[in-house]
Image (cartoon, rainbow, N blue to C red):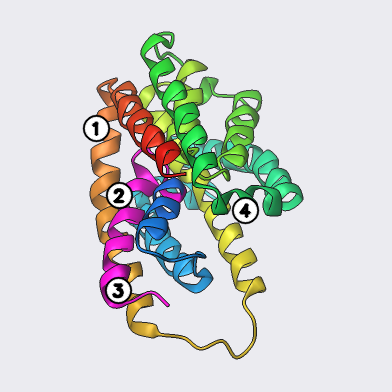
Amino acid sequence: MVSSGQAILLGVVQGLTEFLPVSSSGHLVLGQHLLGLDEPEMLFDVAVHVGTLLAVVAYFWRDLWAMLRGLWGRDEEAERGRRLIWLVLAGSVPTAIIGVLFRHDFEALFASVRAVGIALFITGALLLATHFAPPPRREIWRFGAGRALVVGFVQGLAITPGISRSGSTISVALMLGVERKLAAHYSFLLSLPAIMGALLLHLKDLGPGQEVAWTPLLLGGAVAGVTGLVALKLLIGVVQRGGLHWFAFYCWALGAAALILG
């Protein structure tokens, strides 16, 4: 069982790495390995993901409000909201298919520190590739369903621990020529259905009558949410300045450490 101290530490790790392009799942696997936790605790995993989900909602509330207004409005903001709804729905299709069909195959990798190390090297390669991406030119009106499907497919593959969801989706969007701010915003808006779907699957798998230690759960979720907001603000600034590729070296260093530990 996760203690309160471990909950705070893992909450900080989850909050920072969920949004920074360095793989939260990979860090949690390594963190649990170092803390001597043999298996990830499902309820705690749910709690920290709820915290980061609330952080996304709080940070991107303007985009979410535009999407809501898109259901009835007729002005430019509402039109942008309708476009975002369409792009999020399109990108969620391949993510959902991969998540439903191959979820257990990917989750089996959580037991392998070596697999996390290899995946971190892949994440680093994707991040470095953004340094050579074409100049960003596609605003939301030129960001079509085809590119949304590609980004959604990559998000589905990011179920793999060590593959950063934010890093891989933003990197691919940038390489497809999507404008930097839009690439970052779309990546995190696309994460909302994926995170909620994963939470529902986790909740479905919880056994009846399971003993719940509420203090570590609440601590972990709250810490993950607060640190997540800080990480979001930092990452959006880095993406807009074109500095995403610098995270590649951290991923490679951590991947090398994971291979040594494994």
Q: Around disc 2, counting alpha carbons within 10 Å, would you say few (fewer than 14), some (14 to 19), or many (20 or more)?
A: many
Q: Amino acid at mark 4?
A: Glu
Relative side of 241 to 93, left or right:
left
Query: What residue is at 36 percent from the left and 38 percent from the top?
Result: 257
- SS for dot 2: helix
Tags 2 and 4 touching, CB below 8 Å: no
Give the x, y percent position of residue 127. 40, 24
Q: Around disc 1, counting alpha carbons within 10 Å, would you say few (fewer than 14), some (14 to 19), or many (20 or more)?
A: some
Mark drawn on residue 76: none
| The N terminus: image quadrant | bottom left
Give the spatial CA distance, label 2 vs label 4. Answer: 21 Å
Mark drawn on residue 16: 2
Asked if residue 34 is positioned above or below residue 129 in the image, the reply reads below
Disc on the earlier residue, 2 or 4: 2
Query: What residue is at 38 percent from the left and 74 percent from the top?
Result: 2
Asked if residue 46 is positioned above or below residue 145 in the image, the reply reads below
Query: What residue is at 33 percent from the left and 77 percent from the top?
Result: 3
Of discs 4 and 3, which sits in the foreground? Answer: 4
Give the spatial CA distance, label 4 vs label 3. Answer: 25 Å
In the picture of the structure, the residue carrying the numbered disc 4 is 107
Of discs 1 and 2, which sits in the foreground? Answer: 2
